[in-house]
Structures are given as C-alpha cells and as structure tokens.
Amino acid sequence: MNEDITQNKTDNPSFSHTIFKKLFSCLIGRKLGLFGHICRKHNSRRIKELMFERMEGANGKGRPHTEWLYDITEWGKASLQNLSQAAMDRKSWKSLVKMASDIYGR
C-alpha cells in the first residue's frame, strides 16, 4: 500500500514541479555563492584566472555551449564587473543570492 502512495506522489505534476523549483532555487544559491567565494580570492589564484579568462581552442560542431558566467549575469541582473565588486561585501552578496534564488526558484 505504501508503494501506491509513493507512486501517486511522484506522478503528480504539481509535486514534481514543486521539487523542481526547490532544486533550481538551491542550484542558483550554490552557483552564486561559489561565484562570490571565488571573487573574494586574490587575483593571483588560478581558479580566478580560469573563471574570468577565455579558454583557447575551438568548440566542435553543434549548439554553442552555455557558459557558467552567463547564468551568473542573468540571475544577478548586472555585469560581471559589477557583480564581482558586489561579492566583496559578504552581507550584501548574501542578500543578492537570497533574492535571486527566491525570484528564479519560484
């Protein structure tokens, strides 16, 4: 009998949509949090160089890759330069992350 309840719960579209929204909200918060963490590091760190510089080489055929930083600028509603400066203040960055995850997670 418990299997029937579980089966009905996972087949319910509204339940699946609610789970998707929660996961997406969590994903946004994690990505923006990592971006802020990396921005607060020293400029000489390799991870910061990799994140802000272009990679050499060409992509293969097909659809262009979506870059990680495109999502950051879309969710933050600002340029990368403005967002990286905003990330230096942890308190304001935390409120921006919360706001973005609430808006896009709904």
Image (tube, rainbow, N blue to C red):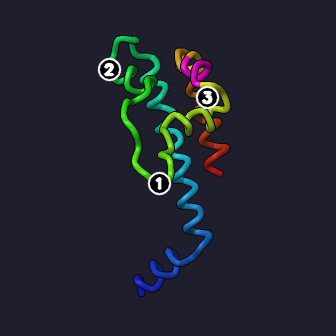
Mark 1 to mark 2 CA distance (whole Å): 30 Å
Residue 83 drawn in magenta = yes
Residue 103's x, y, as percent? 67, 44
Position of 48 with respect to 78 (left or right) is: left
Residue bearing mark 3: 95
Q: Amino acid at mark 1?
A: Gly
Magenta stretch in the rendered image:
80-84
Pair 1/2: label in front? 1
Residue bearing mark 2: 46
Residue in the image at 59% along x and 73% along y: 13
Q: Is residue 7 above or below residue 71?
A: below
Q: Residues within 10 Å of mark 1 (few under 14, many from 20)?
A: few
Pair 2/3: label in front? 2
Q: Are marks 3 and 1 in contact (CB under 8 Å)?
A: no
Position of 32 with respect to 43 (left or right) is: right
- Tag of residue 62: 1
**Element type at mark 3:** helix
| Magenta stretch: dominant secondary structure | helix
Can you name the residue that lies furthest to the bottom here? 1
Q: Residues within 10 Å of mark 2 (few under 14, many from 20)?
A: few
Pair 3/1: label in front? 1
